[in-house]
Image (tube, rainbow, N blue to C red):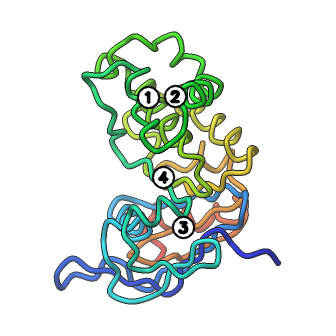
Amino acid sequence: MSIPILEVIDLHAAYGRIEVLRGVDLTIPKGAVVALLGPNGAGKSTLVKVISGQKKATSGDIHLGGVHLKGAASEELARSGLCTIPEGRSVFPNLTVAENLRLMSYAGVSASAILDTAYSYFPRLHERRNQFAGTMSGGEQQMLAMARALTADPALLLLDELSMGLAPLIVDELYDTVRQIAESGVSILCIEQFARTALRVSDYAAVMTGGRIVASGEPGEITEAMTDVILGGAA
C-alpha cells in the first residue's frame, strides 16, 4: 500500500480549556478527493488550522507524505506541498485578476506559466483578467483563490467551505474543476457543511461531529451517518 499523502492520528486541540478536537483520525490517499462533512461547530475548520500550521495541537501526530510535521510552521508545510484555500476566499480586492496571479511569481514560478495554469482551469478568469478582483462575483473570486493556489503546484490542497455563500450552479461548476484538478494528480481535502456536491466528486468521505470523525468510507457508505448527524443521532 502506498504512503497516504496525509495521515492524522489521534489529534487533539483546544481553545483555552475547551477541547475542540477530541482524537481525530483521518487518512487521505494520494491522488484522492476526500470530503470532510459535518455541521457547524463540528471542529472541521479547527482541524484545517491545525493541519495547515495555523494552530498548535495539544497532542497527536500529523504526517504529510510520510514525514512527521506536527508543529511545523505554515511556510514549512507550504514547501512540503500543502496549500490551503481558507473560508472567505482572501483575494486582493484592489488588484486586477492578472495582478493577483502575478504575485505568485515571487515564489519562483514564471508569470507566464502562472497565467497559463490559471486560465486553463478557469477560462472566465482570462475574460476578467483586467477587472479588479473586488468587483467580481463570489464565485469568480473563489475561482481566483483556487487558481492562485494551483500555481504553487501543491501535492495536497485543502478547500475550506468552498460552497459558502455561492449559488448551487456555481458550486457545481467549482466542484467539476475540483475533480479535474484531482485527475492531474493533486490530492484534495474538501471541508464542507453541505454534502451533496462534494460527495458527487469525492472518492472517499468522512463525517465529523463533536470534534471526532464518526464515520468514513466511500460516499455511498456514509449517507446514513450524515443523516444521523443532521438529525442529532450521532454522538
Question: Could you tell which of marks 3 and 4 lies nearer the N-terminus?
Answer: 4
**Distance Cα–Cα, label 3 vs label 4:** 10 Å
**Distance Cα–Cα, label 1 vs label 2:** 5 Å
Which residue is at 38% across, 28% downward?
Answer: 100
Q: Position of residue 227 (x, y in %)?
A: 55, 62
Q: Amino acid at mark 3?
A: Val
Which residue is more in the foreground, 194 or 104? 104
Question: Could you tell which of marks 1 and 4 lies nearer the N-terminus?
Answer: 1
Asked which quadrant contains residue 123, the reply is: top right
Residue assigned mark 4 = 192
The residue mark sitting in front, 1 or 4, is: 1
Asked which quadrant contains residue 211, the reply is: bottom left
Quadrant housing the N terminus = bottom right
Q: Amino acid at mark 2?
A: Ala
Residue assigned mark 2 = 111
**Distance Cα–Cα, label 1 vs label 4:** 29 Å
Residue assigned mark 1 = 102
Mark 1 near mark 3, Cβ–Cβ under 8 Å? no
Give SS at disc 2: helix
Dot 3: few (<14), some (14–19), or many (≥20) neighbours within 10 Å? Answer: many
**Distance Cα–Cα, label 3 vs label 2:** 39 Å
